[in-house]
Image: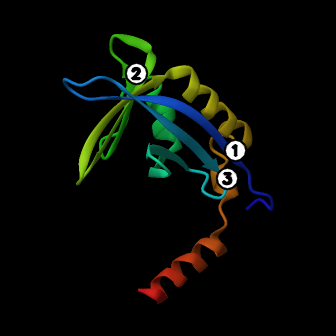
Amino acid sequence: MRDESQTIRATAMFELIAPDAPVVPVKVELCYSSRDPYAVQASFRTGHDTTVDWVFARDLLADGLVDSAGTGDVRVQPMGDDPSKIELELTSPSGHALFTTPKHALEAFLQSTYDAVPATSEYSWLDFDAALSDLLDTTARD
């Protein structure tokens, strides 16, 4: 475990793609913390002071920049007719959304996360005592 945590934030513009509807721009804040070194959070601004947060694997995002990645609620892949854009597909019990965004924005964000916590070194950043404490606190409240 490292003594000092690092947080990387970036803002990107995504486009919500809906069938038979105009494209809707959506501001997305990407966040990475060395306290949770395997995960990336994407916060989609859906209205006035309202966000929808999705957390998924950093590796999923990285893999999706070069090929189709993900088999569950989050899928990432280069856009078929324009490889300079990435498609991000989100599925939940309450709905489905397809977004596109420029590849370079995600590449820059990911590079800064790898500068902070290099690939394959994530394990050394985990704080097992804190994670166990959080788990026990949550279990005790349930």
Kindly state the secondary structure of the residue where label 3 is placed: loop
Q: Which residue is at 24% across, 25% downward?
A: 21
Residue that mark 2 sits on:
78
Q: Residue furthest right?
A: 3
Quick one: label 3 or label 2, which is nearer the N terminus?
A: 3
Circle 1 packing at 10 Å, graded few (<14), some (14-19), many (20+), is many
Q: Give above or below for 109 relative to 66.
A: below
Q: Which residue is at 30% across, 46% downward?
A: 72
Disc 3 from disc 2: Cα separation: 27 Å
Q: Give above or below for 75 relative to 6.
A: above
Task: Using the rendered view, name the quadrant where residue 125 is placed.
Answer: bottom right
Closer to us: 61 or 126: 61
Q: Which residue is at 73% across, 51% downward?
A: 6
Q: Is residue 6 left or right of residue 42?
A: right
* Circle on res. 117: 1
Coloring applied to the structure: rainbow
Residue 104 appears at what percent x and percent y? 57, 21
Q: Amino acid at mark 2?
A: Pro
Disc 1 from disc 2: Cα separation: 25 Å
Q: Residue furthest bottom?
A: 140
Quick one: label 1 or label 2, which is nearer the N terminus?
A: 2
Residue that mark 3 sits on:
34
* Circle on res. 87: none
Residue 25 appears at what percent x and percent y? 43, 29
Asked whether the beta carbons under mark 1 and mark 3 sit within 8 Å of each other, the answer is yes
